Image: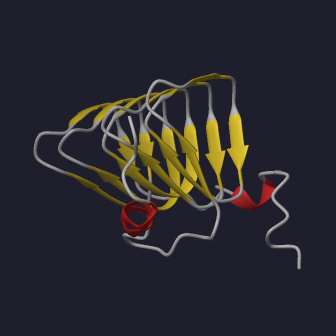
Amino acid sequence: MAFGSKNKIKKELAKGIEPCGTITMLSEGAVLDGSLKLGGDLRVDGVVNGDVQGKKKVVIGEKGKVIGDIYCEFLELHGRVEGNIKCKQVARLHATAFLRGDLYAPQFSVAIGASFIGASKGEQKDLNLDNVKTNDTSSKK
């Protein structure tokens, strides 16, 4: 199944922040076993069995699922996460979201209809996303 147009995806990722220029997508039906580290934005409509570390925005689509912890700057959760989420800035749990785990973020919202089983903690002063090592060379110009 297709994600939709590239412009539509960029607009969705841009809610709250601008995309950093690099968008990694895991499409519906794809399964990744292992941890994922990236320097740009991520959209998951498939399944990740492992931790996700991103320097920017992470979007979990309605059919997306992450079984592991997520570390990011911004999060948009429409799908399912079974693990802890640590956001440096803002996390949004939309009406279709399911989170079983703790949420660490200075700002977050939980929409009516979302399921959240866990605890929430406000500050993430010690979350350092600069240590995420990737092969992304787009910022080295």
Tell which residue pokes out farthest to the right in this image: 141
In the image: residue 111, left or right of residue 60: left
Q: For the point 77% across and 52% down, which residue is it?
A: 132
Nearer to me, 56 or 63: 63
Q: For the point 69% across and 23% down, which residue is it?
A: 34
Q: For the point 43% across and 31% down, which residue is it?
A: 28
In the image: residue 116, left or right of residue 67: left
Say if 134 sits above or below 29 in the image: below
Quarter that holds the N terminus = top left
Quarter that holds the C terminus = bottom right
Query: What is the number of callouts on the image?
Result: 0
Q: For the point 81% across and 51% down, which residue is it?
A: 134
Q: Position of residue 49 (x, y in %)?
A: 57, 21
Tell me which corner region of the image, top left, top right, bottom left or bottom right, holds residue 61. Answer: top left
Q: How is the image coloured?
A: secondary structure
Tell which residue pokes out farthest to the left in this image: 112
Say if 117 sits above or below 9 in the image: above
Tell which residue pokes out farthest to the bottom in this image: 141
Q: Position of residue 2 (x, y in %)?
A: 40, 41
Nearer to me, 90 or 36: 36
Tell me which corner region of the image, top left, top right, bottom left or bottom right, holds residue 138. Answer: bottom right
Q: Position of residue 15 (x, y in %)?
A: 37, 69
In the image: residue 48, left or right of residue 93: right
Say if 61 sits above or below 9 in the image: above
